[in-house]
Amino acid sequence: MLKGIIFDLDGVITDTAEYHYVAWKEMGKKIGIDFDRDFNENLKGISRMDSLERILEYGGKANDYSREEKEELAYEKNEQYKKLIKQITPANILPGIKQLLEDCQQKEIRLALASASKNGPVIVERLELTEQFEVIVDPATLENGKPDPEIFLKAAELLGLSSEECIGIEDAEAGIESINRARMFSVGVGSADSMKEANYFVKDTNELNLKKILKKFENQ
Ligand code: B16
Ligand code: MG
């Protein structure tokens, strides 16, 4: 029986990808690496430091910076990002999500957040959704980022539920892999191609409907 739903944040509850993009792009400019929105897709669901490593590799500068310099670059990016996310309001909750959260509450399905973002709690606060989530996993407590299953397993553990009792919802390929490796039912939001590993997927958040999700879960 389904007892818990574990949500990704960026790309499922709200769309912060553009802010990440703007902030990374500005940092890239300073060190002479330019990239476009297509490349930015590779950074979805990936931790801050792993994102920086991917950008440096893309720009052919993977070995040009010390650990401390990388920390500084990631710090600068995050300062810029924190300025940008100040403009987030409840109006930025993606279509269909409020209804889905309400439907879950009505059915006493417990909710957790499994975001790779260390800014997750601030964003959820700005969306005025803090109270809806019983558990928010702190990514700083984890050893491995997505696609490792650790974050989804941790969320289930904190809810006191088994993997079989939970569903994970994600928009990133790395996130779907993480859910699948946690042996949970995976629900994807995105294109058929990027969500091909998901147990069930929709193209847009406004197609996320609890009844439909439950039906797919029960018939798995
Ligand atoms: P931060 P999610 C992820 O959030 C983003 O998709 C990814 O682009 C970002 O690098 C990562 O959080 C870390 O974010 O720099 O704020 O700690 O999709 O797992 O909710
Ligand atoms: Mg995401």
Image (tube, rainbow, N blue to C red):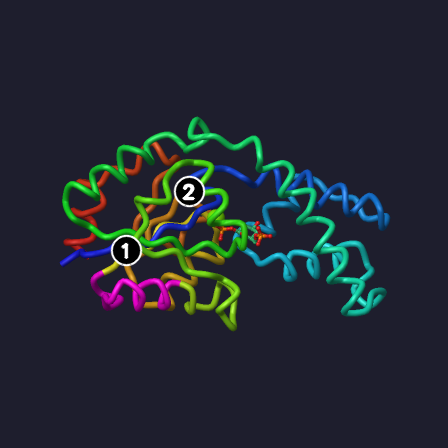
Mark before the other along the chain sequence, 1 or 2 = 2
Label 1 Cα crowd, 10 Å radius (few <14 / some 14-19 / many 20+): many
Q: Is residue 199 visible?
A: no
* Residue depicted at 56% across the width and 57% down the height: 46
Closest to the observer, 131 or 8: 131
Residue labelled 2 has its Cβ within 8 Å of some atom of ligand 2: yes
Q: Which amino acid does the dot numbered 2 rest on?
A: Val
Number of numbered discs overlaid on the protein picture:
2
Q: Residues within 10 Å of mark 2 (few under 14, many from 20)?
A: many
At x 30% / y 53%, what residue is drawn? Answer: 134
Magenta span: chief secondary structure:
helix
| Residue 4 falls left or right of residue 146 | left
Q: Please give the name of the residue rendered at 85% of the width and 65% of the height, measured from the top-left corner.
A: 64
Label 2 residue SS: loop
Which three-letter amino acid code belongs to the residue tagged 1? Ile
Residue 36 horizontal/vertical position (percent): 70, 40
Residue 172 can be seen in this image: yes
Above-or-below relation of 112 to 83: below
Q: Which residues are magenta?
A: 152-165
Residue underneath mark 2? 12
Between residue 194 and residue 57, name the one nearer to us.
57
Q: Which residue is mark 1?
A: 167
What element does badge 1 sit on? strand
